[in-house]
Amino acid sequence: MCAMLLLFPMLLLSQQWQQDFTVALEQARQQEKPILLVFAGSDWCGPCKKLDRDVWQSETFKEYAAQYYVLYKADFPRKKKNQLPQEIVATNAALAERYNPKGHFPLVVLLDEKSEVYGKVGYRKGTPQDYLDLLNSYLQ
């Protein structure tokens, strides 16, 4: 029981990737936070996997993102076992048509609460803090 009480604050700060872009957009409006929209091929794109492992899963990113970003991953898996529900596939395709028409993977798009683009970036070598600094430079 004590362990659960100690972990509870950590759960509140952990990053939460939204499952619905409409919810992400509404959350961004209510909380006045930018949306971090990530186009990924989770089961086939090597740089996507590396970005996930090196940046998105880092404690530095998780702690920062929980406070300052709304997160949405537009995933495009290829393996049959990883296929997403049709509704999510349709949403991700519409997002790709608008924000990633050339089909670059990974592509990270920072949006304001009105879905306007602050900036875009692909995979970059560096620390999670380097990546956050780059993303935040788009907000200025």
Image (cartoon, rainbow, N blue to C red):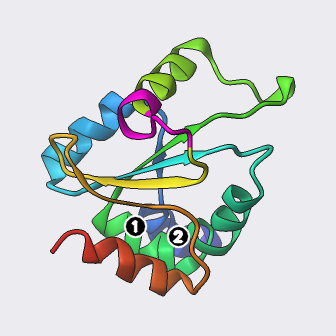
Tell me which corner region of the image, top left, top right, bottom left or bottom right, holds residue 58. Answer: bottom right
Please name the residue that numbered disc 1 is placed on.
Answer: 65
Q: Is residue 71 magenta?
A: no
Q: CA distance from mark 1 to mark 2?
A: 23 Å
Q: Nearer the viewer, residue 67 or 110?
A: 110
- Left or right of residue 131, residue 56 in this image: right
User: Which amino acid type corresponds to the residue marked 2 in the rendered image?
Assistant: Leu
Count of numbered circles on the image = 2
Q: Nearer the viewer, residue 118 or 22?
A: 118
**Would you place residue 14 above or below residue 54 in this image?**
above
Tell me which corner region of the image, top left, top right, bottom left or bottom right, holds residue 137. Answer: bottom left
Whole-percent x and y of residue 25?
26, 38
User: Which amino acid type corresponds to the residue marked 1 in the rendered image?
Assistant: Ala
Other-residue count near label 2 (Cα within 10 Å), few / some / many at <14 / 14–19 / ≥20: few
Magenta span of residues? 96-103
Identify the residue at image location x=48%, y=34%: 19
Mark nearer the N terminus (1 vs 2)? 2
Tell me which corner region of the image, top left, top right, bottom left or bottom right, holds residue 91. Answer: top left
Whole-percent x and y of residue 138?
25, 69
- Left or right of residue 75, residue 109 in this image: left
Q: Is residue 98 magenta?
A: yes
Mark 2, secondary structure of its residue: helix
Name the image quarter holding the N terminus.
Answer: bottom right
Please name the residue that numbered disc 2 is placed on.
Answer: 5
